[in-house]
Image (spheres, helix red, strand yellow):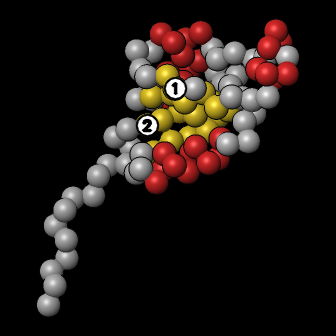
Amino acid sequence: MTEPSTIPHPDIHAERILILDFGSQYTQLIARRVRESRVYCEIHSWDVDNAFVRDFDPTGIILSGGPESVIDPQNAPSAPEMVFTLDVPVLG
């Protein structure tokens, strides 16, 4: 008889990734890949409240781009400035 595995389950909330969505068609795919890596993540709009970002306490942030950055770069939305002051990796 085989004994159940004694390998502890990792705490999925130990690492928390915040994905800021700028309208990319790949945002859901990015989130899926992060979750397949057993890392907790949430998708939120690029204009999310600064207080929420601080309370979420991410270990990393992914900026998922949108078409405006190519079509109309002068009027494209940008990430909140505080994102770059959190001392966490920012990917995008």
Question: Local crowd at mark 1 within 10 Å, few (<14), some, or many (≥20)?
Answer: few
Q: Label 1 sits on what residue type?
A: Leu
Q: Which mark is residue 91?
A: 1
At a point 48% along the width and 50% down the height, the residue shown is 35
Image coords of residue 18 (percent x, y): 53, 33
Q: Which mark is residue 27?
A: none
Image coords of residue 3 (percent x, y): 15, 80
Q: Is residue 71 above or below residue 3?
A: above
Image coords of residue 44 (percent x, y): 64, 34
Which secondary structure, mark 2?
A: strand
The quadrant the C terminus occupies is top right
At a point 48% along the width and 45% down the height, the residue shown is 34
Q: Is residue 78 visible?
A: yes
- Whichever of callouts 2 and 1 sits on the residue coming sooner in the sequence is 2
Using the rendered view, name the quadrant where residue 43 is placed.
top right
Which secondary structure, mark 1?
A: strand
Image coords of residue 91 (percent x, y): 52, 26
Q: Is residue 77 left or right of residue 44?
A: right
Q: Is residue 85 above or below residue 62?
A: above
Q: Label 2 sits on what residue type?
A: Arg
Q: Is residue 39 above or below residue 62?
A: below
At a point 82% along the width and 9% down the height, the residue shown is 74
Question: Local crowd at mark 2 within 10 Å, few (<14), some, or many (≥20)?
Answer: some
The residue indicated by pointer 2 is 16
User: In 3D space, how far apart are the residues under numbered discs 2 and 1 (Cα atoms)?
Assistant: 14 Å
